[in-house]
Image (tube, rainbow, N blue to C red):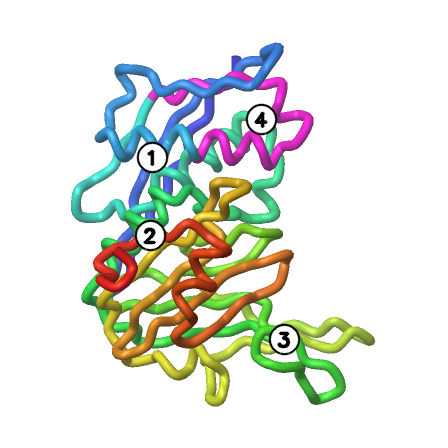
Amino acid sequence: MTTATYRLARQTARWCRFAVVTVEVVPAASTAVQVARTAGGTRVERREAELGAHSALRALGDEGRRWQVTVTEIRATETDTGVGDVHEASARAVWRAAGGGPARRGYDGLADPGLVAAWLRDRLGLRLDGVTEARHWYDGRRDGDTASLLHAWLHFTSCPPALLHGRGEALLLSTEDPYGPYDMAEHGDVRVGPARPPDLLASVVGERLTGAAVLVDVVTGGCGGLLLRLGGTDLLVAAVGDEWVLERDPRRAAVEARWEVRPERLDNYS
């Protein structure tokens, strides 16, 4: 049996993050995750810890199918712990117990529709202060809005930056600072900076989030996209086949034909 603890603690002038998760990992014939009765935490925090451990095992691939995980301790606070903090601490604790695993690659983030919905609820009414984008350039030029976009970060008032990135049919959400620009030699370069017109995400900076919906992929059951009402605009942000989908005021029928829509204070989708 291997025991590991991960402590997530960060504070800035605008926001705080805090979560501590301890796990026990033992070899097993098949994957299993449980949260001990004595681990503590609220019902939501215990669910986050369970899902975070499962996501870590999936990231380990074949190796992850040989581990049984027990979450033995969850520590969080009402003021400093946000949605996703316990999830991330749990995933990183499992990787640490399993000998490192993919922790060096970084944490993928939330894909569970319930957790993404909770993240959205925490931001309803807040102003989108900025959007940071990472885009691919080649020979001083870039392709169109969706074709050149690699990652996007949403900066809501008094909240840590939220990274959105697509993987297959999933839209993943994590708390992470924007990375810096980098050179790709003969393949071009990646430039990172504020979203600028005429790119779509630039058009909603300064607006308040007044409604939202999680778009659930009907095949995987995971989050495939978001519908964000910012000011007078409904903004579709989604991933389909490793490609970005960005659209202003999408037709309701087209959205419902592709995803199950789970609204949060989005009246004309309820």
Image coords of residue 21 (percent x, y) = 36, 31
Disc nearer the start of the sequence (2/4): 2
Tag 3: amino acid: Ser
Disc nearer the start of the sequence (4/1): 1
Disc nearer the start of the sequence (3/2): 2
- Residue 98, numbered label: 4
Q: Secondary structure at mark 4?
A: loop
Please rate how many residues cluster around mark 1, counting C-alpha atoms within 10 Å: few if below 14, some from 14 to 19, many from 20.
Answer: many
Work out which quarter of the rendered image holds the C terminus and state it: bottom left
State yes or no: discs 4 and 1 in contact (Cβ < 8 Å): no
Image coords of residue 34 (percent x, y) = 40, 18
Residue behind mark 3 = 148
- Residue 10, numbered label: 2
Disc nearer the start of the sequence (1/2): 2
Closer to the observer: label 3 or label 2?
3
**Residue at image location 31% in from the left, 39% down from the top:** 19
Q: For the magenta stretch, what is the residue range?
A: 52-72
Q: Secondary structure at mark 1?
A: strand
Tag 2: amino acid: Arg
Q: Main secondary structure of the magenta part?
A: helix
Viewer-proximal residue among 105 and 265: 265
Question: How far, Cα to Cα, is label 1 from label 3?
Answer: 37 Å
Q: Is residue 141 left or right of residue 78?
A: right
**Residue at image location 74% in from the left, 71% down from the top:** 184
Q: Residue 20 falls in which quadrant of the image?
A: top left
Closer to the observer: label 2 or label 4?
4
**Residue at image location 66% in from the left, 25% down from the top:** 63
